[in-house]
Image (cartoon, rainbow, N blue to C red):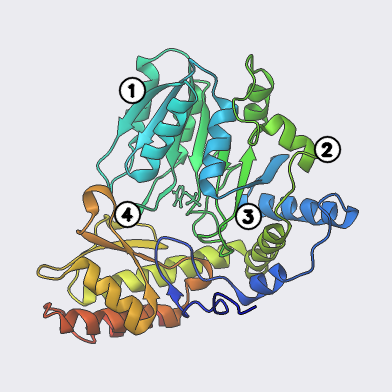
């Protein structure tokens, strides 16, 4: 019989959008490792090692640290379905798409959501958290997004954490884009529940969601009166699968666990501080390069992420055709704007394995070329020179 389709052969790309990022060849190789059973003693060893690596990268001693089967959003849902019961009050910071998604998920849990908002591109202020906590009795948790991928804003955590704990609430943090890119400090910032993903700065394919819970959060879950409404994400059962008991719950995605273990091993090998420093240095170099070309950035410097930059689309330039040309002619993928920023900004990622000097210069050169062809008023070569110099330091 003739094969109906050709062999899988997608084009080669440089992934510089809001995720997924390029995957390290070592991770791809790990994924090609032959399978073993998910209850094989050797796989249990691999799970244990992966948990230990996750604790290192989360900067935590939290016992309850494991990888949920699913993308970052499954981690988000895990945190909310396990911590919230119908009628619980939660304060949620909304300053972008992912804050909005947290509200949606929390409402589906039957929680009473108290929204605090900041314009997209800005961050939630400690005073807003304090005001919300003073204005409502017995708030169970406060949730914020550490790195808002829809805008490129970095949410400071320390002050908010103090306020949350002074009111005996739990602090929930979305670290999908921050983990492995900028410091998160789960223990230092006393974060009670945190979820991340594999395809942003961890640079594995999408498919798992590392989560971590403090003792306080674990105690709160143990005191639940109602059953967790999701069978698949119920941590009381998943814990026994990842814990010493190893009760069968669902079949762990074996190859993705191989991938996560190898990706985390690469982060730890480089050293957490070195990883953060690389992201800061190259992110800032890219940003100064874009400004050097004459473009402006959406987020103020003091709260601007290094691994995700939103840059305003210059006047007279067509959003989609620029991105199309970058993709087709140079193989570079970047992201468009979301929500109110649609058609106004591009989102450029430098995450994990994609965060390399060659990508900074390649992207600046390609963008400059495409913009010039579209008749935009850009300063040619200046951006690249500035970025190259910044990377030398
Ligand atoms: C990407 C992202 C998510 C969602 O992760 P998926 O892997 O797409 O499910 C959640 N929060 C933030 C901040 C993200 O960047």
Q: Specify few, some or many for label 4: CA neighbours under 10 Å numbering under 14, 14-19, or 20 or more.
A: few
Q: Earlier in the sequence, mark 3 or mark 1?
A: 3
Give the numbered dot on residue 247. 2
Cα distance between the residues tagged 1 and 4: 24 Å
Residue 366's quadrant in the figure?
A: bottom left
Question: Pointers 1 and 2 in contact (CB under 8 A)?
Answer: no
Q: Is residue 113 above or below residue 312?
A: above
Residue at coordinates 43% horizontally, 26% vertically from top-left? Answer: 107
Question: Pointers 3 and 2 in contact (CB under 8 A)?
Answer: no
385 relative position to 239: left or right: left
170 relative position to 307: left or right: right
Rendered-image quadrant of the N terminus: bottom right
Observer able to see residue 388:
no
Can you give x and y, in whole percent of width and height, for residue 194 in the image? 56, 41
Can you give x and y, in whole percent of width and height, for residue 335 in the image? 34, 63
The residue indicated by pointer 4 is 302
Question: Pointers 4 and 3 in contact (CB under 8 A)?
Answer: no
- The residue sitting at the right extreme is 41
The residue indicated by pointer 3 is 57
Q: Earlier in the sequence, mark 4 or mark 3?
A: 3
Residue at coordinates 37% horizontally, 35% vertically from top-left? Answer: 93
């Amino acid at each position: 019989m003739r094969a109906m389709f050709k062999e899988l052969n997608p084009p080669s790309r440089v992934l510089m959008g809001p995720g997924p990022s390029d995957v390290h060849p070592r991770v791809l190789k790990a994924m090609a490792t032959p399978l073993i059973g998910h209850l094989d003693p050797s796989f249990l060893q691999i799970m244990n090692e992966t948990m230990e690596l996750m604790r290192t990268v989360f900067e935590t001693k939290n016992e309850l640290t494991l990888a949920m089967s699913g993308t970052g959003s499954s981690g988000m849902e895990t945190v909310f379905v396990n911590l919230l019961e119908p009628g619980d009050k939660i304060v949620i910071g909304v300053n972008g798409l992912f804050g909005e998604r947290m509200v949606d998920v929390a409402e589906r849990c039957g929680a009473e959501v108290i929204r605090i908002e900041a314009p997209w591109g800005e961050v939630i202020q400690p005073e807003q958290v304090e005001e919300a906590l003073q204005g409502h009795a017995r708030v169970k948790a406060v949730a914020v997004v550490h790195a808002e991928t829809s805008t490129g804003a970095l949410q400071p955590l320390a002050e908010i954490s103090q306020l949350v704990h002074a009111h005996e609430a739990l602090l929930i943090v979305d670290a999908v884009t921050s983990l492995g890119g900028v410091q998160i400090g789960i223990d230092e910032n006393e974060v009670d529940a945190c979820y991340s993903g594999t395809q942003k700065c961890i640079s594995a394919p999408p498919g798992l969601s590392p989560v971590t819970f403090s003792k306080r959060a674990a105690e709160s879950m143990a005191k639940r009166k109602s059953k967790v409404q999701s069978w698949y994400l119920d941590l009381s059962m998943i814990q026994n699968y990842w814990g010493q008991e190893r009760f069968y719950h669902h079949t762990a995605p074996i190859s993705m666990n191989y991938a996560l273990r190898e990706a985390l091993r690469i982060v730890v090998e480089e050293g957490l501080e070195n990883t953060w420093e690389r992201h800061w240095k190259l992110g800032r170099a890219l940003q100064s390069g874009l400004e050097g070309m004459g473009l402006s950035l959406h987020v103020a410097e003091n709260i601007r992420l290094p691994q995700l930059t939103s840059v305003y689309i210059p006047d007279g330039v067509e959003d989609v055709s620029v991105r199309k040309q970058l993709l087709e002619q140079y193989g570079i993928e970047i992201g468009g704007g979301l929500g109110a920023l649609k058609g106004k900004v591009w989102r450029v990622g430098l995450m994990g394995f994609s965060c390399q000097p060659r990508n900074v210069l390649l992207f600046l050169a390609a963008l400059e070329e495409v913009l010039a062809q579209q008749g935009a008023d850009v300063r040619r070569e200046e951006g690249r020179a500035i970025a190259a110099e910044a990377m030398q330091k």
